[in-house]
Image (cartoon, grey):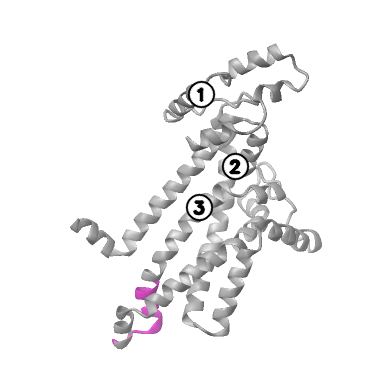
Amino acid sequence: MIIFLAAQVLPGDVARRILGPFADQRAVDELSKELGTDQSLLAQYWDWISSFVTGDLGESAVTGRPVSDVLLDPLVASAKLALLAFIIVVPLSIAGGVLAALHEGTGRDRLISVGGLSATAIPEFVWAVLFLLIFALWLGWFPTTAQPPDGAGLFTQIEYLLLPSLCLVCVLFGYIARMARAGTIEALEADYTRTAILKGLPQRTVIRRHVLRNSLLPTIAVVATQAGYLMGGLVIIETIFNYQGIGLTLARAATQKDIPVLQSGVLIIGIVYLVATLIADILYSVLNPRVRLEAAAE
């Protein structure tokens, strides 16, 4: 309901936008009737949501194409960018957080913690412009766009997506590393870790079997919340790198007042958030048997 009402308050008339500012008012009224935008908000909402739950996303008010066709390619494109960024940032952040925790209070700890949070504080568009200037224009190592040519192979696509992915890594590293560091410090101070050390287990074994398994619990929640952001919050990155993802598609739909595309796209991103949260809950229970035992006891 919030998505629907937020889309309705956007300025402009979709029929007038399609036909142009000099179109006859009768033609505009006829097109509004054809699109259903002349109906009451309650009727428009019921028509949209009842079709959405059956898999019918409707048709674009601007292009006339099915909304599913309009959103499919951008969703796949954003998923590729998000996946590459996740593959880089999650292991790197966890390793950085664990390393900082193992050297708590030292220069390494301060470098990783302060450096990561400082990188997070810099907006993503600043990283994008900076990386484009250095690595694309000055050094020429990467292309200036993230949109690979049609029919490009896997490694070519990675080459085009690597630079925007690194921008996202800079933004997300501080959050995830901070949580991994806090979880690792808490696990290192736990009784089961001291017991394992007193048994004479090697440090690597203690960290791998006891510390990491428990230190990753708070990190999972942070990683899950970033999934929705990477799928729908990349408008600036996609605009700067001219990447035809879901964020740029929704921004274009908002400016064109293409309500069916805008509503369905935002709702799909909301579903991605829910699925990511569900996966995080499942992983949390897998890594922490006490959650399963408490649920069974209840």
Q: CA distance from mark 3 to mark 1?
A: 30 Å
Judging depth in this view, the residue of 177 and 200 nearest the camera is 177
Q: Which of the two residues, 130 or 22, is positioned nearer the viewer here?
A: 22
The residue located at (67%, 50%) in the rendering is 236
Q: CA distance from mark 1 to mark 2?
A: 24 Å
Does 1 appear above or below 176?
above
Expressed as whole percent of the image width and height from the top left, the position of residue 34 reads 59, 15
Q: In what element is the residue under mark 2? A: helix
Considering the whole magenta stretch, tell me its main secondary structure.
Answer: helix
Q: Amino acid at mark 1?
A: Gln
Disc 3 + disc 1, Cβ < 8 Å: no
Give SS at disc 1.
helix
In three-dimensional space, the C-alpha distance between marks 3 and 2, rounded to whole angstroms, equals 13 Å
Q: Secondary structure at mark 3?
A: helix
Q: Which mark is residue 246?
A: 2
Outermost residue to the right: 138
| Sequence-wise first label, 3 or 1 | 1
Q: Is residue 296 magenta?
A: no
Q: Residues within 10 Å of mark 2 (few under 14, many from 20)?
A: many
In primary-sequence order, the first of circles 3 and 2 is 3
Task: Indicate left or right for 143 with 223 as reference.
Answer: right
Rendered location of residue 120, percent (x, y): 60, 64
- 30 relative position to 179: left or right: right
Where residue 11 appears, x then y in whole percent? 66, 32
Residue at mark 1: 44
Q: Which residue is denoted by mark 3 in the rendering? A: 227
Amino acid of disc 2? Ile
Q: Identify the magenta region.
A: 199-212
Location of residue 237 in the rendering, given as x and y in whole percent from the top left corner: 66, 51
* 14 horizontally vs 186: left or right: right
